Amino acid sequence: MTILSPTSIDEAVAALADPAIQVLAGGTDFMVEVNAGHRRPDKVLSLRHIPELRTWEQLPARDDPAHVRLGATVTYTDMLQPDLAQLLPALAHAARTVGSPQIRNAGTIGGNLATASPAGDTLPVLAALEAVVEVASPLGVRDIPVATFITGPKRTALSPGELIVAVRLPLLDGHQEFRKIGVRNAMVIAVASLALAVDTRTRTVRCALGSVGPGPIRATEAEEWLAGTIDWDRPAATTEAPDLAYFGRLVAGAAQPIDDHRGTAAYRRHAIGVLAERAAAQAFGAGSAA
Amino acid sequence: MPERVATLSPIRLSVNGREYQLELDHRTTLLDALRENLDLTGSKKGCDHGQCGACTVMLDGRRANACLIFAVAAQTHDITTIEGVGAAGNLHPLQQAFIDHDGLQCGYCTPGQICSAVAMLAEVEAGWPSAVTPDVAAGPVDLDESETRERMSGNLCRCGAYVNIVAAIQDVVG
Ligand SMILES: Cc1cc2nc3c(=O)[nH]c(=O)nc-3n(C[C@H](O)[C@H](O)[C@H](O)COP(=O)(O)OP(=O)(O)OC[C@H]3O[C@@H](n4cnc5c(N)ncnc54)[C@H](O)[C@@H]3O)c2cc1C
Ligand code: FES
Ligand code: FES
């Protein structure tokens, strides 16, 4: 086995012309597979020494709405730093539930996307925010919306030889959060997770679900219903308990859960409804501050 | 299956302020290099899967699972292992506190716990929020018992010495 450690994106992309090469970012999925004997790479392309992949920037509002562009090797720890956390609070909420501090120091957003686990914690947030994945290969660059990037459990639209370079997320105006249920907080894979993002400018609510389907699921019917019941001129503290419960039922209806060793489909459907109700209460219920 | 050729390369590791030159197979993890090649056996292998934290070392002062990084990829970092945290006669305050509070039973997890705690205190100093910090866009952190537990959640202890580990860390925080 040989490891290539380029220091620029261009060099990394050029190296991908070799079909045998495997991309290594933080290693928190990759190395587990290597150590378990499930992955035996001959050639590895390490992204660790490419500083431009580890940066993020807030793009000028030439795009409407304004965006944040996160390089592919931005880590969970990076997402938790106050500058970035205040721009993308739901992503920070998701980041702080991932693994352990050690895992958060190493694991990256690009790795979470490429792994495409149904339980990947950033995925509901990226789906709710309608993030766009920037991909590069020796043939050129392309943009893939997250909704089409994840094609199934552990399956993506990445072609061989393609590198995730960045993820673009819009900056919204309004309450955002991520909630996750697992057996405990640290080091657990989500049994159900949910991201909610409110945009007071476009008067929309976005809600995406994780771990209750083959990939993240947008609860569009529930989103539209909730957006339609809110008094957008003063959205905080206007939604009553029965409405919140109805929203929870609509979200539960959008889930496509399965039974596995972590939980039954029935439990997951119930749990996702509860998460939705609580998230909406935080955004629009009594005492909220959307 | 095609024959697998080990690629040996000269590599340079900077561990505890000392430079080491070695010839390593690229597949060697940092954890194996430390233990098998450098005879720094303080870092332990509990799971080899990133789950237990027994292999925790610091890369440029940040905690990392040494089982999840190839040694070749660790060449650019300043690596600190438990051997570099303190030694007999010159213990780090956290090492002394673990002794004073019986923060261990078999001791297998202890080097990882202490490396993790050293880096954790630096994270708190820098104001990094945790999963139990009320506001993610936070300011200064009060390292109370629940913050300590959450922030040490990457280090498991099969002997269940958690109560005393938390007490030892709290003691150092003052
Ligand atoms: C103990 C433990 C706990 C965990 N807990 C959680 C959790 O709570 N929630 C969660 O979501 N995940 C969790 N994970 C999984 C993992 O940490 C995340 O999926 C992480 O984001 C992976 O990122 P990485 O940089 O480590 O990827 P790597 O392991 O380096 O790579 C993963 C895969 O993505 C590919 N890849 C990486 N970067 C790119 C790129 N830029 N372009 C193309 N392909 C790329 C690699 O080839 C590989 O196939 C956990 C893992 C461990 C070991
Ligand atoms: S041996 Fe590395 S985390 Fe367990
Ligand atoms: S003291 Fe035995 S594993 Fe922690």
Image (cartoon, rainbow, N blue to C red):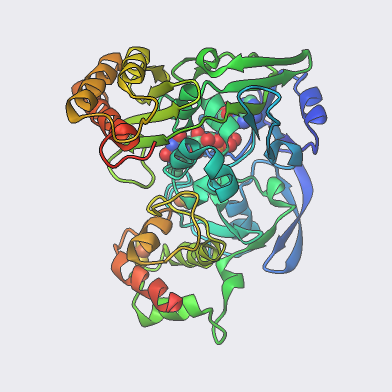
In the image, farthest residue toward the front: A233
Residue at 37% of width from left, 82% of height from top? B100
Residue at 77% of width from left, 51% of height from top? B11
Quadrant in which the N terminus of chain A appears: top right
* Of residues B46 and A158, the one drawn nearer to the viewer in this rendering: A158
Could you tell me residue B31's position as x and y percent?
Answer: 58, 53
Q: Is residue B62 left or right of residue A183?
A: right
Q: Is residue A200 left or right of residue B58?
A: left
In the image, farthest residue toward the bottom: B89
Residue B1 visible here: no
Could you tell me residue A110's position as x and y percent?
Answer: 59, 30
* Of residues B81 and A167, the one drawn nearer to the viewer in this rendering: A167
Residue A276 visible here: yes
Looking at the picture, does residue A179 appear above or below residue B35? above
Q: Is residue A275 left or right of residue A87?
A: left
Residue at 67% of width from left, 68% of height from top? B16
* Of residues A282 and A273, the one drawn nearer to the viewer in this rendering: A282
Could you tell me residue A36's position as x and y percent?
Answer: 48, 36
Could you tell me residue B14's position as x and y percent?
Answer: 73, 61
Q: How many marks?
A: 0
Residue at 40% of width from left, 78% of height from top? B171
Quadrant in which the C terminus of chain A appears: top left
* Of residues B163 and B130, the one drawn nearer to the viewer in this rendering: B130
Looking at the picture, does residue B47 appear above or below residue B145? above
Quadrant for residue A271, please give it: top left
Quadrant for residue A142, please give it: top right
